Image (spheres, rainbow, N blue to C red):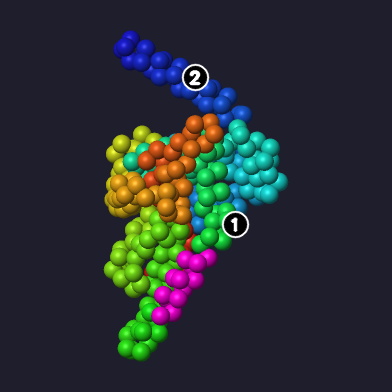
């Protein structure tokens, strides 16, 4: 009897302490809907989270707190508040929440997309801006674009003469993909209307699907080792295919020792050394190539029917 009484009192004291601690912590956070035990506010998001968050913002303001499982999330829903967060307090709030699917192969530790504001991130961002999307790089690739468009027109003309069925979305995807791959590697990744193009497109769509899929491991970090929905496992398969492809291309370029003669992104990355002695590693080059080719391919794939 005494043991039960002691246990009851201990549980009561612990509950009170936990309540007071949480109350003191949450009092510093913006207002928001009351979270349910364990689930938090997940059920309130519904099938269209952006609509649900817009409705909640009408009640709780442009800066509100919601609980996504066990993860406390601050939602910004107005232009003025976004300016406050992204311009005036960008350094303090620059760290991004990393989805569990992006932790495969430690991709988050070398990717310009997921790194926090560190010297490595600044150097990678500078390379991305000056070597991939710069005006000079776009001007240098004009000859490649004209050549690949000519190949596309020749393919359509030949198919028309032989009365072959043409999948316009597929061959345009392949053409644009080859423009990007020639700018990056000086080689075609896929022939027009080929199995290789379809396979690569399937990988890109697979990456899009797993990144956008709701994942319980993101809301309940304790579930990360279990990967209950298999999201990380699927991501590992898709990223494994991309890494194998890029590792082969990088190794062949290094073995040929002709990277100095090529005028592409890979040659620039392999030769790159900053004034402060910063040099890109194989892993960082591979991660940067993945970001470039996947982001570009996702944009292309969204322009056409799968």
> Which residue in the protein does label 2 denote?
17
The residue at the point 48 percent across, 38 percent down is 273
Marks 2, 1: nearer the viewer: 1
From mark 2 to mark 1, how far is it between C-alphas? Answer: 60 Å
Q: In this view, does 129 lie to the left or right of 206?
A: right
**What is the span of residues highlighted in magenta in the rendered image?**
142-154
Can residue 18 be seen here? yes
The residue at the point 59 percent across, 57 percent down is 135
Q: Position of residue 195 (x, y in %)?
A: 28, 68
Asked which quadrant contains residue 160, the reply is: bottom left
> Which residue in the protein does label 1 denote?
135
Q: Position of residue 256 (x, y in %)?
A: 31, 49
The residue at the point 52 percent across, 48 percent down is 128
Residue density around tag 2, few if under 14, some if 14–19, many if 20 or more, within 10 Å:
few
Q: Please tell me whether mark 1 sits on a helix, a strand or a loop.
A: helix
Q: Does the magenta stretch include residue 152?
A: yes
Task: Give the answer, above or below, for where 217 lies relative to 136.
Answer: above
Task: Give the answer, above or below, for where 203 lies relative to 148.
Answer: above
Choose the circle earlier in sequence order: 2 or 1.
2
| Disc number placed over residue 58 in the picture, else none | none
* Figure quadrant of the N terminus: top left
Q: Where is residue 55 in the image (x, y as percent from the top left)?
A: 60, 53
* Figure quadrant of the C terminus: bottom left
Is 80 in front, or is 163? 163
Q: In this view, does 55 lie to the left or right of 198?
A: right
């Amino acid at each position: 009897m005494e043991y039960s009484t002691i246990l009851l009192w201990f549980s009561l004291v612990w509950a009170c302490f936990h309540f007071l601690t949480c109350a003191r912590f949450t009092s510093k956070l913006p207002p928001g809907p009351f979270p349910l035990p364990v689930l938090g506010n997940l059920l309130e998001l519904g099938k269209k989270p952006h609509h649900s968050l817009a409705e909640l913002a009408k009640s709780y303001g442009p800066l509100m707190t919601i609980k996504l499982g066990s993860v406390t999330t601050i939602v910004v829903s107005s232009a003025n508040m976004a300016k406050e967060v992204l311009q005036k307090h960008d350094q303090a709030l620059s760290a991004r929440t990393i989805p569990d699917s992006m932790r495969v192969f430690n991709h988050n530790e070398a990717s310009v997309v997921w790194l926090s504001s560190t010297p490595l991130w600044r150097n990678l961002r500078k390379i991305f801006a000056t070597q991939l999307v710069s005006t000079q790089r776009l001007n240098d690739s004009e000859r490649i674009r004209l050549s690949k468009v000519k190949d596309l027109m020749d393919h359509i003309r030949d198919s028309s003469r032989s009365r072959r069925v043409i999948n316009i979305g597929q061959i345009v995807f392949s053409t644009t993909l080859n423009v990007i791959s020639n700018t990056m590697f000086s080689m075609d990744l896929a022939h027009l209307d080929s199995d290789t193009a379809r396979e690569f497109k399937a990988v890109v769509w697979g990456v899009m699907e797993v990144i956008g899929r709701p994942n319980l491991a993101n809301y309940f970090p304790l579930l990360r080792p279990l990967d209950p929905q298999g999201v990380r496992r699927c991501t590992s398969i898709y990223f494994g295919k991309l890494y194998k492809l890029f590792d082969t291309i990088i190794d062949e370029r290094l073995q040929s020792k002709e990277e100095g003669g090529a005028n592409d992104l890979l040659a620039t990355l392999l030769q790159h050394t900053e004034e402060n002695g910063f040099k890109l590693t194989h892993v960082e080059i591979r991660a940067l190539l993945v970001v470039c080719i996947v982001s570009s391919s996702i944009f292309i794939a969204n322009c056409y029917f799968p």
